[in-house]
Image (cartoon, grey):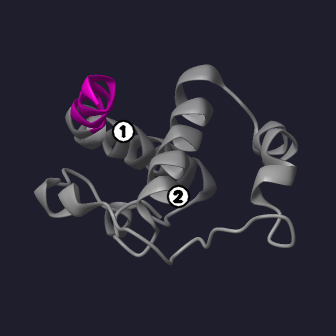
Amino acid sequence: MLQHNAYSRNVWLEAREMVALFIYKGTTPADVRKRNRQKLDSGQRSWRITKGEKLSEFDTIVWSHTIADVRLDNPEIYCADIKRWAITVLEDTDGLVAKLSSDEKRL
C-alpha cells in the first residue's frame, strides 16, 4: 500500500515501480515475483521492509483517490476501481518521483 509512509524509502520507491510495471507494461504478479525472488527473500537480504529512512517527501503527496474509494459492489466494479486507484497513485506521485530522479542524477 503506497498511501502510507510505513515502508522504508527504497521499498516505497520499489513498490511504486512494481505498480507502474503492472499498469503500464502489463507485467503479471508472477513475473514480478520471479524477477525479485532473490532480492526480496527475507533470508537473503540485509535490509528491512519498514525499517530505515522513510520517504521524507511523503507528506507533500496529495492523494486524489484512495483505497477507501474502491467499491465492493461486484467483481467488475471492484477490478475497475482497483485499476483506477493504481493509476491515480502513479499520477499523484509522478512529479515527486521525477524530482527524486532528477535530484539523484545531480548527486
Q: Is 79 inside the magenta-drawn segment?
A: no
Q: Residues within 10 Å of mark 2 (few under 14, many from 20)?
A: many
Using residue 99 as the reference point, say whether residue 72 is left or right of it: right
In the image shown, does 75 or 101 lie closer to the viewer?
101
In the image shown, does 63 or 4 lie closer to the viewer?
4
Determine which residue is flagged by label 1. 90
Residue placed furthest toward the front: 107
Using residue 33 as the reference point, say whether residue 47 is left or right of it: left
User: Percent x, y for residue 91?
Assistant: 29, 35
* Disc 1/disc 2 C-alpha distance (Å): 15 Å
Determine which residue is flagged by label 2. 11
The span picked out in magenta is: 97-107
Residue appearing at x 24%, y 32% in the figure: 103
Q: Quadrant of the C terminus?
A: top left
User: Percent x, y for residue 75?
Assistant: 62, 55
Q: Is 100 inside the magenta-drawn segment?
A: yes
- Give the mark toward the camera: 1 or 2: 2
Q: Residues within 10 Å of mark 1 (few under 14, many from 20)?
A: some
Residue appearing at x 25%, y 24% in the figure: 106
Query: Given the image, on which type of amino acid does mark 1 rest?
Result: Leu
**Residue contact at pointers 1 and 2, CB within 8 angstroms:** no
Query: Given the image, on which type of amino acid does mark 2 rest?
Result: Val
Mark 1 or mark 2: name the one nearer the start of the chain: 2
- State whether residue 93 is above or below residue 40: above
Question: Secondary structure under badge 2?
Answer: helix
The image quarter containing residue 94 is top left
The image quarter containing residue 2 is bottom left
Residue appearing at x 85%, y 51% in the figure: 37
Using residue 63 as the reference point, say whether residue 46 is left or right of it: right
Q: Main secondary structure of the magenta part?
A: helix
